[in-house]
Image (cartoon, rainbow, N blue to C red):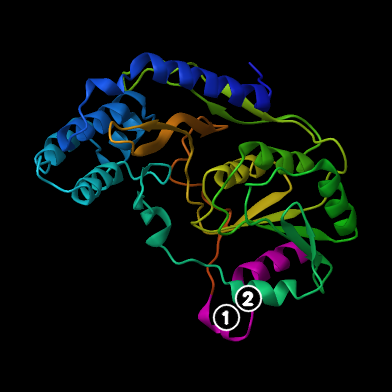
Amino acid sequence: MKIDSTIRYALSIVLLCFLFTSCIDEEEYSNSPQGNFEALWRIIDEHYCFFQYKQEAYGLDWNEVHARYSRQIDESMTERQLFEVLTNMLAELRDGHVNLYAGFDVGRYWSWHEDYPSNFSDTLLNRYLGTDYRIASGMRYRILDDNIGYLRCASFENTFGAGNLDDILLYLTPCRGLIIDIRDNGGGLVTSAEMLASRFTNESVLVGFMQHKTAPSHNAFSGMEEQWIHPGKGIRWQKDVVVLTNRQVFSAANEFVKYMKCFPRVTVVGDPSGGGAGLPFSSELPNGWAVRFSACPMYDRNRQPTEFGIQPDHQVSLLQEDFLKGEDSIIEFARKLLVK
């Protein structure tokens, strides 16, 4: 069935709140190293959404993880030692949406981009933007000297105004094509990603699916709910588009790539995106530390997970010889595509 995006995500939060308040009783565990370890393991065990996929992808066994890390817990350990053990345990999930928050640090898994070249340079970006670029809704844009439009979208943390998007696209209308650079965009609001994507289609398009956990079992999920992008109200782009990606394109930005790949006049260039295809939720340990994790899985229109990223149509990296000439290899590749 078709579900409006705003209603869908509101229902997701309501459902998750119900599941968490009904399934987790944090007072069952003592505020001790062992109690906090068991509470964290159980929260993830009952509510994390990618166990089956990651078992198939790289052999994740959450029960084996419990057995291995429980041997490292000692009642005399300091809170920083406990934090290190718990963070290492969560890293077994290989999920950038999984974090442990203490007053002195944030536990995170960032290997999904730290183990790859950045393929992005602020120095080169400033060369292409110059100083006379325009700014709207946190996005920077200008017309390059070959009449190619360039739109830099560094984050989806802001709500995009419909009037701002109209102004941007109206200004870029004379261009022969458009580059949307979302490299290093770590995500933000899925609704903002949807709103921007809606300006590049003239018809409603099925772009993916979403599920919800319905019980503590690793395989207990609701049916697949359809994700649709509907044509945006206002000015819509009618020419070719190239979206630039790298490994730091994550979460809502990963979803944006998923949406745009469904449109016929869009090409994706750069690195595979970083992934992050689980709608995150948070809970708390007995000692007050917060934990965030993926709770609702999202899929592409072929019902395939995008948790580990989306492949570009053309994989292109920054070349040292181009950098020394002051050229961004990925932008230049996109310009050549649009000129052709």
In the image, what residue occupies the spot 83% across and 48% down? Answer: 164
Instruction: In this rendered view, identify the residue nearer to me: 78 or 219.
Output: 78
- Give the answer, above or below, for where 230 lies relative to 75: above
| Residue type of the residue flagged with mark 2 | Leu
Q: State how far apart marks 1 and 2 are (Cα).
A: 8 Å
**Image spot of residue 255 (x, y percent):** 58, 41
Residue in front for this viewpoint, 225 or 152: 152
* For residue 58, above or below residue 141: above
For label 2, the SS is helix
Q: Describe the element under mark 1 as helix, strand or loop.
A: helix
**Residue 23, how many percent across, how many down?**
35, 16
**Which quadrant is home to the N terminus?**
top right
Q: Which residue corresponds to mark 1?
A: 323
Provide the residue span drawn in magenta: 319-340
Badge 2 is on which residue?
A: 124
Q: Can the viewer see residue 273?
A: yes
- Disc 2 crowd, CA 10 A, few/some/many (<14, 14-19, 20+): some
> In this image, 94 relative to 236: left or right?
left
